Amino acid sequence: VARVGPRKATVKVTTLEDSRSSNREVIIERARSLLIELIKDSRSAGSTITDTVRQVLQTEESVRCKGKLPAGPNVESSDAVIFVEGRGDVLNLLRHGIKNAVALEGTDIPAAVVELSKERTVTAFVDGDRGGEMILQELLQVAEIDFISRAPVNTEVEHLTHKQIMKSLRDKVSAELFMEQNKWARPSSKCSVNSKS
């Protein structure tokens, strides 16, 4: 090369480099970063899909007991039922394989719940807060409750883990013992719908 454009030039070779190897390193590094991003995205997408499917199945598994109250699918056929405070509690129990729960939906206990308590063995499983205590007091006045189980203090049933649910249900006590421990009087026969003997 004697000229570059209109000017005279001299060219000296100072180094030789194989550009293929440097390009290869750039390509490998880019491929590695793309693969890492793809793996991260697929993991989060997989868990999102799993969670979505699980939620859909839980919602579809829940039914209406006596046409009104959210419940698990086994309530109609089970000899024992679990009364919980709300729909979220029923869904959490379903998530952990317990399919015989019925939601009370508040402190105004429906007549259907009172009737159900006469037919089945009933465990009241309530939150470990003041609201849970109020629901228990109301239930004990109008329904036939056999056992009582409470979530840990200041914890709601709908937020319990599998282990906490199983421990709470294992540690249930008879209604009579619970009232004795908490110094609650058995409602008088005038107030109760039908007291157990």
Image (tube, rainbow, N blue to C red):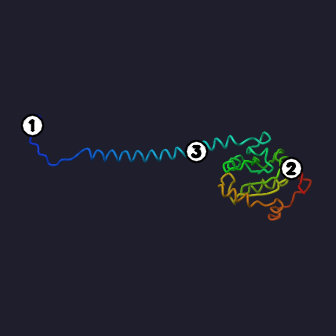
Q: Quadrant of residue 163?
A: bottom right
Asked if labels 3 and 2 touch by Cβ distance under 8 angstroms, the answer is: no
Q: Which label was assigned to residue 50? A: 3
Mark with earlier residue (2, 3): 3
Q: CA distance from mark 1 to mark 3?
A: 68 Å
Asked if labels 1 and 2 touch by Cβ distance under 8 angstroms, the answer is: no
Q: Give the percent coordinates (x, y) of residue 52.
A: 59, 42
Which structural element holds mark 2?
helix
Q: CA distance from mark 2 to mark 1?
A: 107 Å
Which structural element holds mark 1?
strand
**Residue beneath disc 1:** 3
Mark with earlier residue (1, 3): 1
Is 140 left or right of 50, judged from the image as shown? right
Q: Give the percent coordinates (x, y) of residue 194.
A: 89, 52
Q: Give the percent coordinates (x, y) of residue 111.
A: 84, 45
**Residue 59 versus residue 154: which sits nearer the camera?**
59
- Point 71% across, 48% down: residue: 90
**Residue beneath disc 2:** 118
Within-10-Å neighbours for mark 3: few <14, some 14–19, many 20+: few
Q: CA distance from mark 2 to mark 3?
A: 39 Å
Tell me the amino acid under the disc marked 3: Thr
> Which quadrant holds the C terminus?
bottom right
Mark with earlier residue (2, 1): 1
- Point 81% across, 48% down: residue: 109
Q: Which label was assigned to residue 176? A: none
Asked if labels 3 and 1 touch by Cβ distance under 8 angstroms, the answer is: no
Q: Give the percent coordinates (x, y) of residue 10.
A: 9, 42
Tell me the amino acid under the disc marked 2: Lys
Tell me the amino acid under the disc marked 1: Arg
